[in-house]
Image (cartoon, helix red, strand yellow):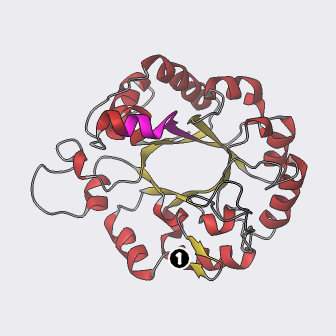
C-alpha cells in the first residue's frame, strides 16, 4: 500500500521559503519534486475554448515535465474538459441564455489524441482523473443515462491506465455508482469541499466498494472566501481544519490497513497553503507515513 501525496498544481511564488528557494531562478517542478512524490496536473483540464478551438498538451511542455522529475515521481492528470463537459460554459452570458452542447463530450478520438500527446509521461502517470461538473437535468436526464454514456466511452479506452471518476452530484453517490465503478475497473475520487458530503460520511457508507486504489482531493468549501483571506498568497494556514483532517486521516489509515493505494491531492484553497497542510497530515499519519 502506498500513500502518494502532493498538491494541486505547483507553480506558486508564494511557496518560496516553504518549497522553493527564497531567491534565484529555478525549475519549479524540478524543485517541487525534491519535496513531494506526486502532483496533480490541472492546467490541461482547461482545453475547451470553442467548437473548433481545443488546446491539448504540447510536446515541449510534456518533455519539460518528463525531464524535471525523478523516475519514481507520479502525476495525477485531470482529463481535458473538452472531453468531460456536456455543454459549453455560460459564464458571462445573460441569465437564461440557451446552453450549447459540446460536440466533443466523451469523444474517444479526442481522448486518444490526448493520450498520444502525453505518451512520454506514461510511466509517470498514476491516475487519469475524469472530473464532471454538477449535471443538472438539462445537461443529463438521469444518473442512468450518465453511467451508460460513460460505459460506452470507457470500454473503448486503453486498459493500461488507472482511471478515476469524480462526480459533483451528491445524489449520484449511491450503490449503483460504486457498483458501476467496480464492474468497469474504475476508482472513486473523494472530494472534500464545495457542496459534497464529508469524505468520512461517503466512505462510511461505501467502504466495501473501495478496492485497490482511491483518490482523495482536499479542495475547500469556498474558493472566493479563502482567496480574500489569503490575498492569494499561499504561504500560511488561514482557515485551519484540524478536526476535519483528523477524520480524513482516520480514513486514510483504514485504507492503508486494507492495502488500498491512496493518492492524496491538496489544494491551496483547502486551508490556505497546500504544502503546509501536507506537513500537518504527515505528522498526523506518523508512524504510518515515512
Q: Is residue 207 left or right of residue 213?
A: right
How many residues crowd mark 1 within 10 Å: few (<14), some (14–19), many (20+)? some
Residue found at the far left of this picture: 23
Q: Is residue 218 magenta?
A: yes
Q: Secondary structure at mark 1?
A: loop
Q: Is residue 35 above or below residue 245?
A: below
Q: Which residue is located at x 63 percent, y 80 percent?
A: 113
Where is 169 relative to 45, above or below? above
Query: Which residue corresponds to mark 1?
Result: 55
Give the quarter of the figure containing the N terminus.
top right
Q: Is residue 226 left or right of residue 98?
A: left
Q: Nearer the viewer, residue 48 or 130?
A: 48
Q: Residue furthest top?
A: 243
* Relative image position of residue 281 (x, y in whole percent): 41, 29
Where are the magenta residues, as a range? Answer: 216-227
Q: Residue at x 90, y 49 (%)?
A: 144
Instruction: From the viewer's side, name the closer residue of 90 and 155.
Output: 90
Please, is residue 153 above or below residue 35 in the view? below
Q: Please state the horizontal and vertical placement of residue 197, each as a whole percent of the image.
A: 66, 28
Horizontal relation, residue 249 to residue 289: left or right:
right
In this rendering, does residue 287 appear at all? no
**Which of the two residues, 44 or 76, is positioned nearer the viewer here?**
44
Decide whether residue 51 is among the magenta residues: no
Amino acid at each position: 500500500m502506498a500513500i502518494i501525496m502532493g498538491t494541486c498544481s505547483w507553480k506558486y511564488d508564494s511557496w518560496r521559503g516553504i518549497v522553493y528557494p527564497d531567491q534565484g531562478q529555478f525549475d519549479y517542478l524540478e524543485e517541487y519534486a525534491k519535496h513531494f512524490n506526486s502532483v496533480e496536473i490541472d492546467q490541461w483540464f482547461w482545453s475547451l475554448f470553442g467548437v473548433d478551438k481545443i488546446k491539448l498538451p504540447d510536446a515541449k511542455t510534456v518533455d519539460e515535465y518528463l525531464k524535471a522529475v525523478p523516475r519514481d515521481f507520479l502525476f495525477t492528470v485531470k482529463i481535458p474538459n473538452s472531453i468531460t463537459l456536456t455543454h459549453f460554459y455560460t459564464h458571462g452570458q445573460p441569465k437564461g441564455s440557451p446552453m450549447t452542447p459540446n460536440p466533443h463530450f466523451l469523444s474517444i478520438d479526442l481522448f486518444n489524441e490526448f493520450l498520444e500527446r502525453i505518451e512520454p509521461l506514461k510511466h509517470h502517470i498514476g491516475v487519469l482523473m475524469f472530473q464532471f461538473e454538477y449535471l443538472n437535468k438539462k445537461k443529463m436526464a438521469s444518473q442512468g443515462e450518465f453511467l451508460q454514456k460513460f460505459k460506452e466511452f470507457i470500454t473503448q479506452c486503453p486498459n493500461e491506465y488507472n482511471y478515476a471518476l469524480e462526480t459533483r452530484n451528491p445524489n449520484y453517490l449511491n450503490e449503483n455508482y460504486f457498483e458501476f465503478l467496480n464492474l468497469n475497473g474504475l476508482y472513486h475520487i473523494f472530494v472534500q469541499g464545495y457542496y459534497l458530503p464529508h469524505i468520512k460520511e461517503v466512505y462510511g457508507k461505501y467502504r466495501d466498494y473501495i478496492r485497490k486504489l482511491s483518490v482523495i482531493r482536499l479542495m475547500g468549501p469556498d474558493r472566493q472566501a479563502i482567496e480574500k483571506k489569503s490575498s492569494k498568497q499561499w504561504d500560511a494556514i488561514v482557515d485551519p481544519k484540524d478536526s476535519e483532517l483528523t477524520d480524513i486521516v482516520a480514513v486514510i489509515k483504514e485504507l492503508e490497513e486494507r492495502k488500498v493505494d491512496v493518492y492524496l491531492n491538496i489544494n491551496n484553497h483547502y486551508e490556505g497553503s497546500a504544502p503546509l497542510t501536507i506537513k500537518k497530515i504527515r505528522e498526523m499519519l506518523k508512524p504510518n507515513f515515512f
